Image: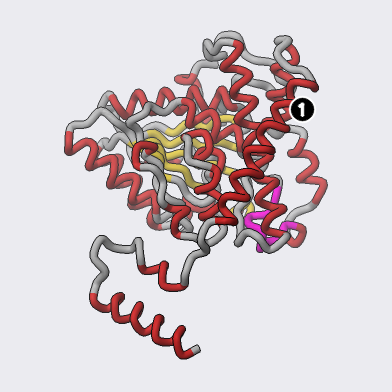
Amino acid sequence: MKISDCDPLQGRRLQVLSPEGKADPELLPEFDDESLRRIFGQLLMGRLFDRHCMALQREGRLGTYAPVEGQEACQVGSVLALAKGDWVVPSFRETMAAICRGVPLETIFRYWMGSEEGSRIPRELRFLPVSIPVGSHTLHAAGMAMAIQYKGEADAVLCYFGDGATSEGDFHEALTFAGVRRAPVVFFCQNNGWAISVPRSKQCAAASLAAKGVGYGFPGIQIDGNDPFAAYLATRTALERARSGEGPTLIEAVTYRLGPHTTSDDPLRYRENAEVEKMRALEPLVRYRQFLKQRGLWSEAWENELAASHQARIEDAARRAESAPPPTPESVFDSMFAALPAHLARQRSELLDALKEG
């Protein structure tokens, strides 16, 4: 199947890598062996970092955390398609995208540890800070893309969000503006099956979320979100389209959240373990490992060595994050505005006075 044949209204989904690890030779990107192994390394790093964050949170060393386990392929493949000048607008589950884009591990840890320093991302990475309100950042992405267009620049914007965001009014407004203005933005929906405890079937009656793109005047494409090659090809095509002035694309990556919505969520209250175990067999690390095995590019010893190297990096970054100066209560005011408005300056002063009295 070609990308142009993927019609979400007809239920045709882009897939390059089957759950058994078999690749479609006509669609497989021309990556060399080193690049193919590097993709596995990124998937593995995401899994190990995610599990380390979960462990730290359970020990009380990290705040509420949104796990990404099961969705790594969406992010690894799509980031791989970015050019250096492109912007990334994440929601709150794009840990793997941040790592692939080069955001320091220590910075990511500091964000989830409650420090505003965790939102101070090197500007040259063009990766915006985490956005917690569901769907509101899609407007930021549309606005940024319109600014790029106005300035005559050749860059594009990649915006991530979950299936729950497609039920928000902000999403509608963002896609309306982007479609009318033919803005250079790619809307990347990671449909992981659940908006917290609400299943996809109760969120929208459309045949696919990708089909919504048609209603805003631009293409929508549905892909296998556990296939990094499908994510790469769809995002690369959409970015090329955006940069050439053809406007936005909506990508729906059908994946599955294996863990809780966040560490404050109990998924056992709304879904069966049998469902999770069924989907675990389709998760990206399993199928990509099979792909490498079939090409003679994987060994248990190699993976173990890679995992040990990654784990050492993760633990070192966590130690540095924990040893950094802790955030102070008044630091919440420091990064909101270039010049703090009078009413917030007054609130900051009142907070400091209360802390002294307390």
Magenta includes 122?
Answer: no
Tell me the residue at 43%/87% (across/down).
354
Location of residue 329 with respect to 259 vertically, above or below:
below
Q: Which residue is mark 1?
A: 304
Kind of residue indicated by mark 1:
Asn
In magenta segment, residue 265: yes
Whether residue 50 is visible here, answered yes or no, is: yes
**Which residue, as the protein is rendered here, is positioned at the far left?**
151
**Magenta stretch in the rendered image:** 259-267
- Can residue 255 be seen here? The reply is no
Q: Going 70% across and 13% down the picture, which residue do you hit? A: 297
Left or right of 346? Residue 266 is right
In this view, the residue in front, 300 or 356, is 356
**Which of 333 and 50 lies nearest the eye of the viewer?**
333
Is 328 situated above or below 293? below
Q: Looking at the picture, how far across and down is residue 133, in whole percent?
A: 46, 59
37 or 356: nearer the eye? 356
**Label 1 element class:** helix
Extreme residue toward the right, this view: 274
Q: Which quadrant of the view contains residue 1?
A: top right
* Depth check, front residue: 148 or 105: 105
Q: Is residue 285 above or below residue 347?
A: above
